[in-house]
Image (spheres, rainbow, N blue to C red):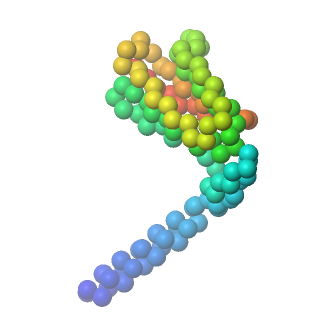
């Protein structure tokens, strides 16, 4: 019985490792402005929500201008910023004193645009 459990556990780990190996993206080398960067091929902003804050991290692989906007449900621009020549973009949005509403955070660089929604109740 003990041998059967060990073989089952090893088979499960092997199957998990094969599945993980098939889902990872390839690693490429990018050269821009004389800098070599070894990184994964696809990057999106990472958003983390807390009770009244939204944290954003973005790896700007192409070193394009990064435009950040926050708009409310009436499409009014609440916040706007353009960052130039930043490889890693980090931003924290504090919604603790914001009016109750639905907000959309827009991050764009080059030809790509990403959205994240935050609801203040």
Could one spot residue 44 in this view of the protein?
no
Q: Is the residue 107 above or below the residue 41 in the image?
A: above
Q: Is residue 62 left or right of residue 106?
A: right
The location of residue 41, given as percent across then percent down, is 66, 53
Q: Is residue 119 left or right of residue 24?
A: left
Query: Quadrant location of residue 68?
Result: top right
At 65% from the left edge and 54% from the top edge, which residue is drawn?
37
At 49% from the left edge and 71% from the top edge, which residue is drawn?
17
The location of residue 92, given as percent across then percent down, is 45, 29
The location of residue 30, given as percent across then percent down, is 71, 53
Q: Is the residue 105 above or below the residue 35 in the image?
A: above
The location of residue 63, given as percent across then percent down, is 68, 40
Q: Tell which of 74 and 24 is nearer to you.
A: 24
Could one spot residue 111 in this view of the protein?
yes
Q: Tell which of 50 and 74 is nearer to you.
A: 50
Q: Is the residue 28 above or below the residue 13 in the image?
A: above
Residue at the extreme front of the image, as rendered: 34
Q: Is the residue 115 above or below the residue 1 in the image?
A: above
* Quarter of the figure with the C terminus: top left
At 55% from the left edge and 21% from the top edge, which residue is drawn?
70
At 64% from the left edge and 61% from the top edge, which residue is drawn?
26
* Quarter of the figure with the N terminus: bottom left
Residue at the extreme left of the image, as rendered: 1
């Amino acid at each position: 019985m003990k041998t059967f459990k060990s073989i089952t556990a090893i088979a499960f780990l092997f199957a998990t490792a094969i599945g993980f190996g098939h889902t990872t993206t390839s690693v490429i080398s990018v050269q821009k402005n004389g800098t070599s960067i070894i990184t994964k091929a696809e990057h999106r902003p990472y958003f983390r929500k807390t009770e009244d804050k939204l944290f954003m991290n973005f790896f700007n692989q192409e070193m394009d201008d990064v435009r950040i906007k926050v708009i409310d449900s009436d499409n009014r621009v609440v916040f706007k910023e353009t960052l130039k020549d930043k490889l890693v973009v980090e931003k924290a949005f504090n919604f603790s004193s914001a009016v109750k509403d639905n907000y959309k955070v827009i991050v764009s660089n080059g030809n790509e645009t990403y959205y994240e929604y935050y609801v203040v109740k």
